[in-house]
Amino acid sequence: MSGFFKSSVGRKVAMAISAFFLMIFLLQHLFINTLSVFNPDLFNEVSHFMGTNPLVQFALQPVLIFGVVFHFVMGFILEIKNNKARQVSYAKNNGAANSTWMSRNMIWSGFVILAFIALHFIDFWFPEINTKFIKGDWSGLDDGEFRYYEHLKHKFVNPLRVVAYAVAFVFLGLHLAHGFTSAFQSVGAASLRKKLGNVGTAYAIIIPLGFILIAFFHYFKH
Amino acid sequence: MNLRLKIWRQKDARSKGQMVDYKVSEISEHMSFLEMMDVLNEQLINKGDEPVSFDHDCREGICGMCSMYINGEAHGPDRGVTTCQLHMRKFHDGETITIEPFRATAFPVIKDLVVDRSAFDRIQHAGGYISVNTSGNTQDANSIPISKHSADTAMDAAMCIGCGACVASCKNSSAMLFVGAKVSQYALLPQGQVEAADRVKNMIAQMDLEGFGNCTNTGACEVECPKGISLDVIARMNRELLKASI
C-alpha cells in the first residue's frame, strides 16, 4: 500500500480523502456557527463541549490539523511537480475552451484559503489554545459566563475583518465548486461525480454563503 | 482566405525556438489544416526556405500522428477531430492563427512542430498488452462470453489513438486519460484479467517515470480528445490501482 501512495494516482486519492474529511468538517462548523445566530446559549454549550471534550480535543482535533496541513502541503507538492511537467508554456492557450476557471486555479483559491486560515487561527484558535493549554483554564468561563459567544461577537466588530472573511469564503466557494466533484472522481467514483454535480454546486454556494451571512449578521447586530 | 500564421520554428531538439510570422493566401475553406500547411511549405520551398516540419500520416483521423496546438487548443478549435480532419472553414479570412507544438516535458520538441511522443510507447510496453500464445493454437476470442455493455465500454476506451492531445491540453501535462484508456480497454475484458494488477501498477509507474504531471480533474483532456475518451477511464484506472494495491 505504501507504493500506492507514492504514485501520482495514490497521491490524488490521498488528496481526495483529506478533502472529504475537510468538507465534512466545514458542514459541522457551519452548523455550530448557525447556532450563534438563532440560539447563543446553545452555541455556548456546543462550543464548550467541542472545546473541552477529550475525544474532540485529543483525537478529532489532531486529525483535523493533520488533514488541513496534509491537504495544503500535498497540494503544493503536486503543483510544483505539475509545473515541472511543462517547462515551456504555450504562446497562446485557450484554457477557457475546455475547462472551468475554478478547476484551473485551485492553487490560487487554495492560497487565499490558507491566508484565511492563518487569520482565523490568530482570531480564534490560538487564543483558545492559550487559554486551555498554556493557562490551563478549561472552564470556558469569562466573568462567570461562557466566553464563546462574546468572543465571536467581538471579532466581527471590525468591518475589515468581516470583508476579509467574506472574500476568503468566496474563494472557498470557488475551491469547492471544483473540489467537491473532483474528490469523487479521484477515488474512482465517476458515476457519483456525475450524479452529485448539482449537490456539489449547492454545497459550494451554501457553505461559504452561510459563513458570510453569519459574519455580516454579527457585524450589523453590533 | 488570406491568413497570417504565427508558427513555432525550432531547428532541432537542442536549439532555442521562436515564433515566426508567415502569410498564406488563396486558402480554400474546404482544405484541411494540413493541406493549408502543405501550401505554406510549397511556398517556403519555392522561396528556398526551410519548410515547417510537422507530424502527419494517415490524414483520416485514425493514426494519431498529427498534433499541433492551434489557437490555444490541441488539434484546433473543432471538437472530436484530429488536425488532419480540421477544416479551414473553422477560421475566417484575415485571421491570425497561432500554431505551436504539443508542450510537455515528456514530449520534447524534435523539430518545429514535431514532438517525441515515444513516452507513450514506453508506457504501453510497461503493460498495455495481453500475453497470448500466438503459435497457432489461439482460442477464438468470440468463444468467450462478454456482456454487450463491457464490450462497448472497452471499445470506447480502445478508440484512443495515442495522439497526446490529452497531455497537450492538460494544464498539468498529465497522461492519465491515455493511460486510463489503455488500462480500461483490458480491464473490461476477460482476456485482460490475468495481468490486470501488474498492468495498472507498471503502466502508472512508467507514466510517473516519464515526467507527466498529476491529474487535477479539470476535464480539458476529455473535451479536446479527438476520439471522445471519457474521464470515466481515469476513474476506472484509479479503482484498478487501488484494487491492485490492497
Image (spheres, coloured by chain):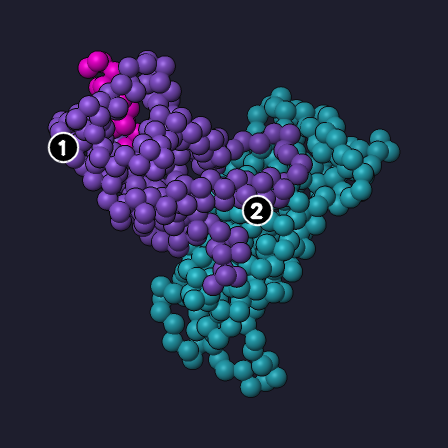
Counting from the top left corner in percent of width and height, residue B10 is at 77, 37
Mark 1: amino acid: Leu
Quadrant where the C terminus of chain B is found in the figure = bottom left
Question: Which chain is assigned purple?
Answer: A
Q: Residues within 10 Å of mark 1 (few under 14, many from 20)?
A: some
Task: Specify the subunit that label 2 lies on.
Answer: B
Q: What element carries label 1?
A: helix
Q: Residue furthest right?
A: B48
Regarding residue B38, the answer to whether it shows in the image is yes
Residue picked out by circle 2: B213
Would residue B157 appear left or right of B145 to someone viewing this image? Answer: right
Quadrant in the picture for residue A150? top left
Q: Is the magenta stretch mostly helix, strand or loop?
A: helix
Dots 2, 1 in contact, CB < 8 A? no
User: Residue A42 bears which disc, if any?
Assistant: 1
Cα gap from disc 2 to disc 1, whole angstroms: 48 Å
Q: Is residue B219 visible?
A: no
Find the magenta span and give its range. Answer: A207-222
Task: Work out which quarter of the rendered image holds the N terminus of chain B and state it.
Answer: top right
